Structure formats: C-alpha cells, structure tokens
Amino acid sequence: MLWSRAAGLCALLQSALAYTPLSDASLRSIPNPGNDFDIHDGAVLAPILVPRVPGTPGSIAVLSHFANFFQKSLSNWTITYQNSTSTTPTSSGKQVPFVNLIATRDPPWSSEGSVGRLALVAHYDSKLTPEGFIGATDSAAPCAMILHAARSIDQALTAKWANTDMDMAGLDDLEEYKGVQILLLDGEEAFSVWTDTDSLYGARSLAETWETTFNPAASTYQSPLDSIDLFVLLDLLGAATPNVPSYFKTTHWAYQLMADAETRLRSLGLLKTTNQKFLAEREKKDSDRWLGGLIGDDHIPFMKRGVEILHLIAYPFPSVWHTIQDDGEHLDIDTVSDWAKIVAAFTAGWLDLDEFMTNPSQVHARDENNEGLVSGAAVKDEL
C-alpha cells in the first residue's frame, strides 16, 4: 500500500506540472450546450429529469440514456458496468441492484495500468422520498454537465492521439499521456436516514472492488483505484449563484486551475452568468477553514483509500435540496451551461489538448512520405 500511495502522489504531481491552460481561441471553441439542456426535450438533460431510484424502471431508463449517448456521441469510449446488490432499510430484506457506469478513454496504444486518469464523477440516482423526487441539482444536471464536457473535448483527444508518431516518440514522451474516465454512480442517496451503511451504495462497492482488482505485474498503476490521478466529483450544481469552496488543501492547486478556467471564460464573455464567481476561494490560505471530508458524498470511499479529491459541491446547499422543488423548473440553465463549459476547459487543460481544440478535424500526421496534412478521420481509421 505504501508503494501505491507513493506512486499515486508522484503521478498527481506530474499531472499538475503537465496541465496546459487553454488559449483564448481554444476556450472559444468549447461549444454551448444549447437545446441539449432544455428541461423538456433537451437530448442530454431532459431524459435524466425523472425519478430514478435504484432498481426502478426510471433508473434503468436513465442508464440506457447514458449508454445511448456514448454509443452515438462518444463511440471511442469503452463502457463497462459494475454491479452490486444490497439490502436497504426499506427493502424488507430483499436485495436492491446498484449499477455503476464507467466510461473510459485511454490512449489507443496504452495497456491496462499504464496511464493515470482524470475521473469525472456524479451520481445518477434520486431519493426515494419525497415521492416523485427528481433531484435536478442532485444530480441530474451534474451528469449532463459531464456528458457535455466529455463530448466537447472528444475530437481534440482523438486528434492528439492520432498525431502521436509511435515510431518517433520515446518512453519519456509517452509518459505525459493520460486517460480520462467518467463514473456515473448509483445509490448515493440514503433510502431512510443517512448512515455509513445507508448511503453511497455504488461508490462503496466500486472503491472496494477496484482496490482489490490488480493490473498486470509491473504496471505503472497497481490497480484501477491507483490509476485515478484526480477524482473530480460534481454534486448539487445547477441552482443560480452557487458558491463552491475549496475543500481540501492537497488539491487546492486543482481548484485554482478550475477557478482560473472560470475567470478566463468570464473575461472573454463566454459564460452566460455575470457579476459572480462560482469558485471564489482561489486565494484561500492554509490558515483558513477547510471543510475537507465533513460533507458525506461519493468521494468518501475513494478518499479513505488514498485517492485525491476535488469536490465541486455548492455550499451552502441549494435551497431546494432534498425537496420536491429540486426539479427542472428550478434549475438555472445558464448556470448549468456555464458549469459544463468550465469543466470542459479544465478537462482539456488536464489532457493537454490546447493545440487540438480549435480545429480537431485536421490533424498533422505523417503520411507514407512523412509529410502532408491528413484528416483526423483518416488517421483514426488507421489506428
């Protein structure tokens, strides 16, 4: 365990050093969600705005929506599911199924355990009570934000990896390449009263499973858990004028990078909300108050196992928290859209995509004569 923690710390420091802020042109290239975030018929958000208690038809429908989104929009991602069951205080001894969706995109030449990953995380289940609870900020909107952010950087990621000449690149060059992973987790909500056993069903199962699943011998990362360089958890986002503190000293540098992305997007007039900052604690000092792990959420089982956490959760909580009013009509869609763009900008910077964001369909790649410009699609077909 000591070896894996030390390796994880080294990987985290390398990722921090490798982060490349986007140019103004690249920031301008991040698309607006547009009608995809319409609460009634938006292709990304609307299908999530339904009750989705684990094991119910609503949960199955939302999981199918996610799978269809990746199939149609992000077909280069690898989709897996992690399943578990548990009794709950309301299940009368019956086992309730929990399904986590894991979407992964690694460099095409990488082997399992060879690259670290940025994890973008939200829970997709909704509370059992009050009856008909939607959970728009909690966490339908965060799921939609992550899907839009992933789609916004996907072509640039393809372009970057297609542009890598594996014959010319050395091992040291390849160490800079990183993967990205989306975790849409089930069973975050308590069925009765929040306790260590009645909450975080999917997160607890996945963290335990990944801790005890080992990559091939001599891998850079010992397990899928060790492969997480940074766990970015979105929750309770989508209400107007959010305040998101910096919760952890050890990842304040990542919070600062996210805050910088927000500031630059605002300065360029690329965000819809004005006269505010979502991430206002960029200059926080060690002597200030750090809430750390005081807020129970899906990061807890991972944090207990040494994973570094960037927790993007509004505090104070939205006024609609855990009430029937936490529905689509009470979302501030401009805020939802802005969060999606901020997360996309941070993700693109983490993956060093700046030079590939503005025109990802045209990729500089070597043809048979070691010269020429070929289309990204053509290169993709050759990989």
Image (spheres, grey):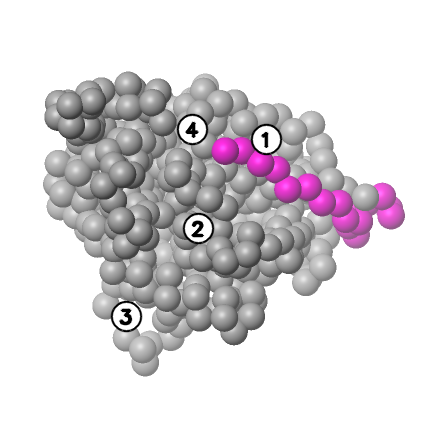
Determine if the magenta segment contains residue 299: no
Q: Earlier in the sequence, mark 3 or mark 4?
A: 4
Residue 25 on image: x %, y %? 13, 36
Give the alpha-carbon distance from disc 2 to disc 4, as whole Å.
19 Å
Asked whether residue 275 is in view, the answer is no
- Relative placement, left or right, of 244 versus 63 is left
Foreground mark, 3 or 4, reads 4
Q: What residue sits right under mark 3 in the picture?
A: 284
- Marking on residue 63: 1
The magenta-colored residue range is: 78-94
Location of residue 313 with respect to 166 vertically, above or below:
below
Q: What residue sits right under mark 2 in the picture?
A: 114
Whether pointer 3 and pointer 1 mark residues with C-beta atoms closer than 8 Å, the reply is no
Secondary structure of residue under mark 3: loop
Foreground mark, 2 or 4, reads 2
Amino acid type, mark 4:
Asn
Q: What residue sits right under mark 4 in the picture?
A: 76
